[in-house]
Image (cartoon, rainbow, N blue to C red):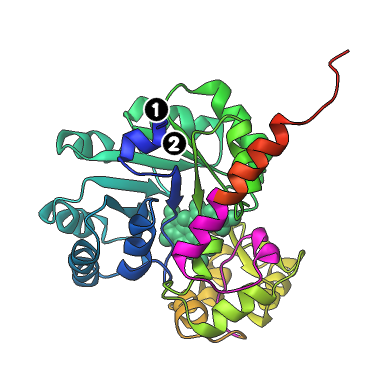
Amino acid sequence: MNKITSLFNIKYPIIQGGMIWCSGWELASAVSNAGGLGLIGSGSMYPDVLDEHIRKCKAATDKPFGVNLPLIYPQTDDHIEVILRHGVKIVFTSAGNPMKYTSYFKKQGITVAHVIANKKFALKAVEAGVDAIVAEGFEAGGHNGIEETTTMVLVPVIREAIDIPLIAAGGIGSGQAMFAAMALGSDGVQIGSRFAASEESSAHPNFKKAIIEARDGDTKLSLKQLIPVRLIKNDFYKKVEEAEKKGASKEELSKLLGRGRARLGMFDGDLTEGELEIGQVASMIRSIKPVSEIIRDIIREFHLTTRKMCNTDFSFQ
Ligand SMILES: Cc1cc2nc3c(=O)[nH]c(=O)nc-3n(C[C@H](O)[C@H](O)[C@H](O)COP(=O)(O)O)c2cc1C
């Protein structure tokens, strides 16, 4: 047992990050059944769709699972109503102000974690009363902090600043990386990209293929003026880059992004014009596997690494 396994009543301190268009009930329940904590990504769901996913997730697992609630979407209050109606006991909030909803969730008996990318927001989240912090570094897939602080630096900075349970995210796809994140002071890890390329992910097969074919340098943090997001460098990414070079305004970038760009890329499989959100760790993901295998491999690698590091033989003098 450690702080994260006991907080969420799970076997392994592995959280599957909420991911728009990728993490529905199938992925979340598979992760929970394999001993981690699955999160339904509500960011790409209308309230009635979230309702359906929670019902299906409850039917597919008797283990704890939660909902990821990005705080940037207009339907947050409706999502909260669905979460409360179903008695979901774990919520991971992200992309917004933790002050707004945390105490309300806590009064409803919900365990709350909040995703941050810098110390200022970590302290704000602690003040808001969250139970755990997810420190997400620059390597991560999806929306990201503007400061570009890497996981390697962010985790110890946040560890030094806070006492509550800490989950590291960004660039973790193996047991070795999990070991490193925990050596830096986290109590657990949140993994996104590796699970996006799992059999149970709802990502389009074209997108899953693009993930396993990506190599180092194939992703970049984009749309920094609007809301920074790490993307595979496809035609859409290049159009954004050109527009930014020409000094496009926020309004022009919003227009270029348009509506439904993320769905087009990740769910409908348009690899040219769609938005393809993935982390740098994609370059280490070589195959699409079932979740149970992914988690088993990570835990095995973690233990092998622990043993290897214990046997490291060099002198302190
Ligand atoms: C395709 C994709 C979609 C994502 N969508 C969300 C989201 O809706 N909400 C959120 O809080 N984080 C989102 N993330 C971030 C993940 O929850 C997680 O923190 C991140 O992927 C961890 O870094 P990694 O990709 O290097 O594993 C997304 C990540 C990916 C790859």
Q: Which residues are magenta?
A: 273-299
Residue type, mark 2 in image: Ile
Q: Label 2, on which residue? A: 133
Quadrant containing the N terminus in the rendered view: top left
Quick one: 171 or 70, which is closer to the camera?
171
Is 242 left, or right, of 12 in this rendering? Answer: right
Give the x, y percent position of residue 35.
Answer: 38, 51
Quadrant containing the C terminus in the rendered view: top right
On screen, residue 317 above or below 50: above
Is 13 left, or right, of 221 in this rendering? Answer: left
Give the x, y percent position of residue 177.
Answer: 64, 46
Q: Residue 24 got which mark?
A: none
Residue type, mark 1 in image: Val
Mark 2 element type: strand
Is 89 left, or right, of 210 in this rendering? Answer: left
Q: Label 1, on which residue? A: 126
Q: CA distance from mark 1 to mark 2?
A: 8 Å
Residue positioned 52% across, 30% down in the render: 120
Instruction: Mark 1 or mark 2: name the one nearer the start of the chain.
Output: 1
Q: Are marks 1 and 2 in contact (CB under 8 Å)?
A: yes
On screen, residue 249 above or below 36: below
Outermost residue on the top side: it is: 317
Mark 1 element type: helix
**Residue 131 visible in the shown view:** yes
Is residue 26 part of the magenta span, yes or no?
no
Outermost residue on the right side: it is: 317
Is residue 274 part of the magenta span, yes or no?
yes
